[in-house]
Image (cartoon, rainbow, N blue to C red):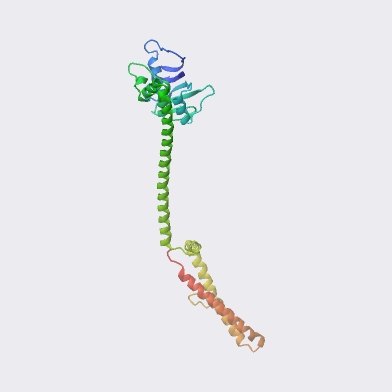
Amino acid sequence: MLAEMRIQGLGVIEDALLELHAGFTVVTGETGAGKTMVVSGLHLLSGGRAEVSKVRTGMLKAFVEGRFELGGAEGATRIVTDAGAEVDEDGSVIALRAVSVDGRSRAHLGGRSVPVGVLADLSEQLIAVHGQNDQLRLLRPAEQRAVIDRFAGEAVTEPLERYRAVRDEWLAVVAELTERSTRSREMAQQADLLRHGLAEIDAVAPEPGEDTELTEQIKRLAAVDELRAAASAAHAAVAGSADGDPDAPGALGLIGEASRHLTGSEDAVLRELGPRLDEASVLLSEVGAELGSYLETLDADP
């Protein structure tokens, strides 16, 4: 049952607390006292449609909070448990409905945010509003079945419990089958994605160490101007300037000149140094040729 309801910022009600007791409760009052807002609060707490026009003028939100005593009601307890809500030590649970002036509506049960439909399911078990334009509990198909089952007594209770156990098991199997089917489709999609990736890798045909080579090539292209300047300067220092400037003969020219001086000497010690200069000249020639090849490989437009 609904043991307590608090309304804030709803219509003419700024803040009101309604304490209900077991038995028959009647709400009376003059026109405009707020009886309709009490019923509106019950509808909101029961998961009914939220109307922004009922938020009190000057308030940003309207709140309706109710404390339900479950009293061992299996259906209500199951709904609260399935929603992950927390039941207080006295066996009651707090439900809250908030409506903002911007049209947004929020529902909470037992300290957890829940869909509005959960409050509607809970209210079917615990609240019955009797009025001119309100549905009676006996008009609800679920309630009709429950009344007939209770009237049938033990003859129906035991088969009904067996049926519910089998149905719960069947629902669990259906849910597991659905989950496995979904996972199967996801795994098939992942397999297709992996096959596509492998096909792309095969089309590229990567070689061992290719990533290192590409990295070096990227660095070379990014610094091509600096590399060309360094290689050109080194090549000029080894082979001499490209325009044949006699003032810049390069290392090869200087070694050649030194070799000529030693070869023409009559001193045996100096002549013995000549072959060593020739070896250095050969080595420098190879370095100069490699520098020239390197300059040709540098991309003019990286």
Residue 291 in view, yes or no: yes
| Residue furthest out toward the front | 155
Q: Reply above or below: 30 against 180.
A: above
Residue 227 appears left or right of 179: right
Nearer to the camera, 184 or 191: 184
| Residue furthest out toward the left | 133
Nearer to the camera, 299 or 109: 109
* Residue at figure coordinates x 42%, y 49% from the top left: 187
Q: Which quarter of the picture shows residue 205? A: bottom left
From the top left corner, tell me how far across and down residue 19 is, in percent.
47, 15
From the top left corner, tell me how far across and down residue 95 is, in percent.
46, 24
| Residue furthest out toward the top | 30
Q: Quadrant of the N terminus?
A: top left
Q: Reply above or below: 80 against 186.
A: above
Residue 240 in view, yes or no: no
From the top left corner, tell me how far across and down residue 113 is, in percent.
46, 30
Nearer to the camera, 191 or 31: 191
